[in-house]
Image (tube, grey):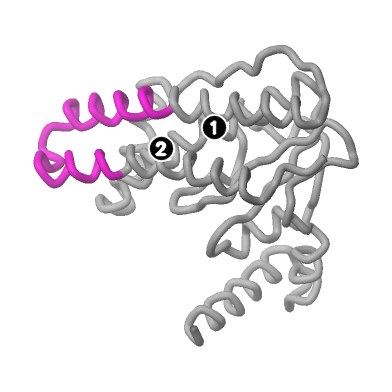
Amino acid sequence: MKISNKAWIEYIKKMSEISNTAADLMENWIKKNGFGNDKALLDYAFSLAAHYGEAIGELSCQMYEATARAQNTIVPPAEPEKTPEYGEVAKAVHGTMKQSLILVPSTIGRLVKQVGADTTLKNAERDGAQFAWVPHGDTCAFCITLASRGWQNISKNTLRNGHAEHIHANCDCQYAVRFDRESGIAGYDPDEYLEMYNKSEGNTPQDKINSMRRLIYSARIRK
């Protein structure tokens, strides 16, 4: 049983709306208040991460349970991951501020998206489900590389320090799960992504990723 492309895109859009709303609200707050009051900034950032993190965690649970039902698998109710603690939000915001102030809103969006990813993977770990990184939209070279790995079992490297890795802002790629080896997501073809990776230049994974970045950039420029 494959989750239809329509159902998956609807899920992606809802996930994106939640994380983007948090980022937009943070951006509007900064435009109005600036960075002069660090505590007020962090308080608001934390409230956004908590509120929209809960929303995206619940949506991830709904998709997880819907996937199980579609594949005729009985699992316990999905459990949403905890939202970021205040200290985690503060560390992320301050770290971003050292790089670029304009990136703070996208950091809040990433923290929210992280809750959704962690929710999916931790429930998959609990239930022995496989996972895959499914690209969407203008996918970056790194996400294509991850997608080329196909369906995988949860391992000790999947969740590091309690979090799914490689979650970044301005990205609509998401984790998908399956409960049997015949199921999946319509349109997701890891062999296609693996071919792109293998055809890229370089002898190391980083060289190949950089090569794909150049090819993707050139293709977009030509458009």
Left or right: where 24 falls relative to 144: left
Three-letter code for the amino acid on which mark 1 is drawn:
Gly
The answer to which quarter of the image holds residue 69 is top right
Residue projecting furthest to the top: 76
Where is residue 196? Give x, y as percent: 75, 71
* In this view, 171 is above or below 44: below
Q: Residue at x 48, y 30 (%)?
A: 56
Where is residue 204? Give x, y as percent: 75, 67
Residue 35 highlighted magenta (yes or no): yes
For disc 1, the neighbor class at 10 Å (few under 14, some 14 to 19, many from 20) is: many
- Disc number for residue 116: 1
Return the residue nearer the eye: 56 or 204.
Answer: 56
**Dominant SS in magenta:** helix
* In this view, 60 is above or below 134: above
- Disc number for residue 33: none
State yes or no: discs 1 and 2 in contact (Cβ < 8 Å).
yes
For disc 2, the neighbor class at 10 Å (few under 14, some 14 to 19, many from 20) is: many
Q: Residue at x 57, y 30 (%)?
A: 60
Range of magenta residues: 24-53
Q: Residue at x 41, y 27 (%)?
A: 88
* In this view, 216 is above or below 80: below
Where is residue 101? Give x, y as percent: 25, 50
Return the residue nearer the eye: 170 or 96.
Answer: 170
Residue 76 highlighted magenta (yes or no): no
Q: Which residue is mark 2?
A: 18
First reached walking from the N terminus: tag 1 or tag 2: 2
